[in-house]
Image (cartoon, rainbow, N blue to C red):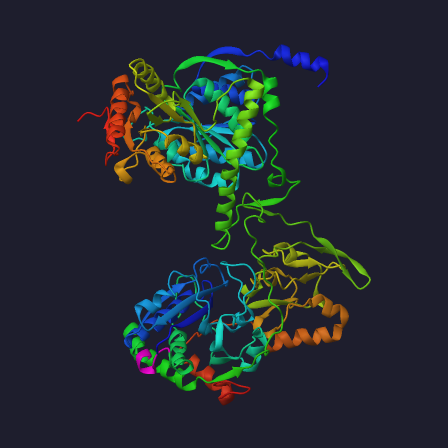
């Protein structure tokens, strides 16, 4: 870079502040990342993202193929195919819309198509409900999609850029779902720093599909019929890509910190007052807000409590998370989802945490909670109650034999 | 019997799937009459509804349930005691929807096991189709033309029970004739079918096929790559463009690249014979062939690539010249050599070859068409054709 260009970059390098929602932050990130193909089909609360993209395109701020499909199934298929020919692609949905696209969702990882999908987390109908539950995104948890949960609009923007960088890395080439809690993120505008395009260009290289690009100059056949003598190797390749994603994620966050000067610490999970904590809660998404409030109150009362927010659910940083959690006297896991009939009748995250602790030399009691379903607010008293149960487990040294539902009318 | 006996039935998709199923069911039901236990299953991954493609069914009989478990939750047994080819052209090998490469018809037959074939050919000619094996095995020929049904109908020409009747003879360890006849009676409620089975038992003879006897060709096959060597993204390389053909001093024409992983010629029961003297170079065979199996030759005639042809007969149907393309029973051929090169090399010899192929091997007629045809056919084959020829025992 010569001196003149360097100066130009510095001048342009001031972040602009904007009042936008989490969905809109993803849309802004798609503009900054110069996404080539954006496919859309409206369903609340994800639709706030597609609407903002449409607005940016209409205003001449964004240049992308914007395709409104006739269903989520087609929407995800089109994004898949766009990704196969080498286009940077974005789609997204919510609740049953995401489920309707499942055939496309299920095959995207094996085809190694690094598209991004914003999931505006929403309860699965029926009954018709708009509120947040994480079961929609979690339905795809085992398929080879990377999954990340954010808790602010700023993180939604930043993670979208990071996710493209990781997904489109040749060592990874996996799709990524960005989960944003319905209402609390998708329909709530907050002040977000919007980085200059020059920073994004430095951070995010071109999507180069190389020898996997579907193009007349590179004639290939994608997804032929295979039998039992091929598929296991294909699964192992996808598995390796997900393993590789761990290291690539670390690299991406390191570079992000360097270029954007925003430090997320450990990319995989956020720690809040964990250093000297005796007990912690663990959860995902915006329930971090009331939890953090309660932690500050309890700390003022002299209680050594903390919080761990799992950001990247897939890949899951089980080694470091297990090492961290095993230090505490008890761990309460808060699920905004359910897994009916699972061990301890708990949610998905709680059993992931139990499995994570299993390999640790010291295993604190785990208390599992289900709360905030259908978008019900997780209140300050709810959080206090969960800390009390967790404290009790620490004192007795024993986990309750069942999951506790918090905030449900008896 | 205190051992597991595996029976493999190789059949042609659509036309013979019910036949194969009937045979395997009959084996298990007959063994049950003697207190044994068994399973019957199709080769999962095969395409039994695909026109003519080789496919497999299996029957496995064991002395007890625990022994049988050794043979369960598998796609195929590792070895067969009896392999049954219900069409003699299947003896040229098996390319399945379920794997890559060509499997010799006798690949699974264990030492001393038996290959059972329905055919009007003498055993000596059938052996020429079969790939060589390092150990000896036996060959039993059940006289008759291959029984072919349609997709929705089963032509009950007794081929099922004729094969079942032969099994106690070729492998007495499997099941006794009495048990087999009792099972047939139970399953089909027909004395006539029991009679057919008994007659088959009496007529069937076997001969030994020695090590190294048969077709010496090494069947094409592929190594399955490990996940670290495989292309990622479930992708395979596309076909490259083809190349001009070189023959002697001549260079010209065009030979397209073809799928090396699935050649599909074992799907064929008939193949086109081309009389190049009659060809008017109209291009129709080349245009209309659904498998692009014609090469454009340097002289602008069209040669059949016999490794790519599945024998559908479209070329014969669209050829505007009388007698230029004629479908001939696949059992009249033992290789996939270029007809054009034969013609170029020695025209008189080629003309004689064409006349001989067309003359002595008319188009196949699948199965029996009227009552009594089977008896007529067996009688017309004469005593020498009734059982094994060339070393019959």
Image coordinates for residue A124, horizontal then vertical, percent:
32, 31
Magenta span of residues = B174-180
The residue closer to the viewer here, A26 or B21, is A26
Tell me, yes or no, whether the highlighted magenta stretch contains residue A352: no
Name the quarter where the N terminus of chain A is drawn: top right
Asked whether residue A316 appears in the rendered view, the answer is no
How many labels were placed on the picture?
0
Residue sitting at 72 percent across and 14 percent down? A3
> Residue reaching furthest left?
A410
- Say above or below: A333 vs B298: above
- Say above or below: A201 vs A213: above
> Residue reaching furthest right?
B249
| Picture quadrant of residue B157 | bottom left
Image coordinates for residue A225, horizontal then vertical, percent:
50, 51
Asked whether residue A63 appears in the rendered view, the answer is yes
| Picture quadrant of residue A125 | top left
- Say above or below: A178 vs B330: above
Residue sitting at 59 percent across and 24 percent down? A203
Name the quarter where the C terminus of chain A is drawn: top left
The residue closer to the viewer here, B254 or A110, is A110
The residue closer to the viewer here, A116 or B263, is A116
């Amino acid at each position: 870079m010569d001196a003149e260009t360097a100066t130009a970059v510095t001048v342009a390098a001031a972040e602009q502040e904007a009042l936008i929602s989490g969905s809109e932050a993803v849309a802004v990130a798609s503009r900054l990342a110069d996404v080539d193909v954006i496919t859309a089909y409206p369903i609340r609360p994800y639709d706030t993202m597609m609407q903002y993209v449409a607005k940016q395109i209409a205003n001449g701020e964004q240049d992308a193929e914007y395709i409104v499909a006739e269903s989520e199934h087609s929407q995800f298929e089109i994004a898949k195919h766009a990704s196969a020919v080498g286009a940077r692609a974005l789609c997204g949905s919510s609740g049953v819309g995401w489920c309707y696209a499942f055939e496309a969702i299920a095959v995207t990882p094996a085809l190694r198509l690094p598209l991004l999908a914003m999931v505006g987390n929403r309860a699965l109908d029926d009954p018709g409900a708009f509120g947040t539950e994480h079961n929609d995104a979690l339905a795809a948890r085992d398929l080879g999609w990377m999954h990340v949960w954010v808790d602010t609009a700023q993180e939604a923007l930043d993670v979208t850029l990071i996710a493209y960088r990781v997904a489109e890395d040749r060592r990874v080439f996996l799709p990524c779902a960005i989960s944003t809690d319905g209402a609390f993120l998708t329909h709530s505008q907050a002040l977000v720093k919007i980085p200059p395009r020059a920073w994004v260009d430095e951070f995010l290289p071109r999507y180069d599909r190389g020898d996997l690009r579907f193009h007349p100059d590179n004639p290939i056949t994608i997804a032929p019929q295979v039998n039992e003598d091929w598929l296991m190797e294909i699964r192992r390749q996808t598995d390796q890509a997900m393993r590789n994603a761990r290291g690539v994620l670390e690299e991406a966050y390191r570079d992000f910190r360097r270029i954007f000067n925003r430090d997320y610490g450990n990319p995989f999970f956020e720690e809040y007052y964990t250093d000297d904590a005796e007990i912690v809660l663990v959860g995902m998404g915006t329930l971090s807000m009331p939890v953090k409030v309660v932690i500050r109150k309890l700390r003022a009362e002299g209680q050594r409590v903390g919080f761990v927010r799992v950001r990247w659910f897939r890949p899951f940083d089980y080694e470091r998370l297990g090492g961290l959690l095993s230090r505490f006297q008890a761990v309460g896991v808060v699920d905004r989802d359910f897994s009916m009939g699972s061990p301890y009748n708990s949610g998905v995250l709680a059993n992931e945490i139990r499995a994570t602790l299993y390999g640790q030399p010291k295993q604190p009691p785990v208390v599992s909670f289900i709360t905030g379903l259908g978008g019900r607010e997780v209140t300050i008293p709810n959080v206090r109650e969960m800390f009390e149960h967790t404290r009790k487990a620490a004192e007795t040294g024993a986990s309750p034999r069942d999951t506790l539902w918090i905030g449900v009318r008896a | 019997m205190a051992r597991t006996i595996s029976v493999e039935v190789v059949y042609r998709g659509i036309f013979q799937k019910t036949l194969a199923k009937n045979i395997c069911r009959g084996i298990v039901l007959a063994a049950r009459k003697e207190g044994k236990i068994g399973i019957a299953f199709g080769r999962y991954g095969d395409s039994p509804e695909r026109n003519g493609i080789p496919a497999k069914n299996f029957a496995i009989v064991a002395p007890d349930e625990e022994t049988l478990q050794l043979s369960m939750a598998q796609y195929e047994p590792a070895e067969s005691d009896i392999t049954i080819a219900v069409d003699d052209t299947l003896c040229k090998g098996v390319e399945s929807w379920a794997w890559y490469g060509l499997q010799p018809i006798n690949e699974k037959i264990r030492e001393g096991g038996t290959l059972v074939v329905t055919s009007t050919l003498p055993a000596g000619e059938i052996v020429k189709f079969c790939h060589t094996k390092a150990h000896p095995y036996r060959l039993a020929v059940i006289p008759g033309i291959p029984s072919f049904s349609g997709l929705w109908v089963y032509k009950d020409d007794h081929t099922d029970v004729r094969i079942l009747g032969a099994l106690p003879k070729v492998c007495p360890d499997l099941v006794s004739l009495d048990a087999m006849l009792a099972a047939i009676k139970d399953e089909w409620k027909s004395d006539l079918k029991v009679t057919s089975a008994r007659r088959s038992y009496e007529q069937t003879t076997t001969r030994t096929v020695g090590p190294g006897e048969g077709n010496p060709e090494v069947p094409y096959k592929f190594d399955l790559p490990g996940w670290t060597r495989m292309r990622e993204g479930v992708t395979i390389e596309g076909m490259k463009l083809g190349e001009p053909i070189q023959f002697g001093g001549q260079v010209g024409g065009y030979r397209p690249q073809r799928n090396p992983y699935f050649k599909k010629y074992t799907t064929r029961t008939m193949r086109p014979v081309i009389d190049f003297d009659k060809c008017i170079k109209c291009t129709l065979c080349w245009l209309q062939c659904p498998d692009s199996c014609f090469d454009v030759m340097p002289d602008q005639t069209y040669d059949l690539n016999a490794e790519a042809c599945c024998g559908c007969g479209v070329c014969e149907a669209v050829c505007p010249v009388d007698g230029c393309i004629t479908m001939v029973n696949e059992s009249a051929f033992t290789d996939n050599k270029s007809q054009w090169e034969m013609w170029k090399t020695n025209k008189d010899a080629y003309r004689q070859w064409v006349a001989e192929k067309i003359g002595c091997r008319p188009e196949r007629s699948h199965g029996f068409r009227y009552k009594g045809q089977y008896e007529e056919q067996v009688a017309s084959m004469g005593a020498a054709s009734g059982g094994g020829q060339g070393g019959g025992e």
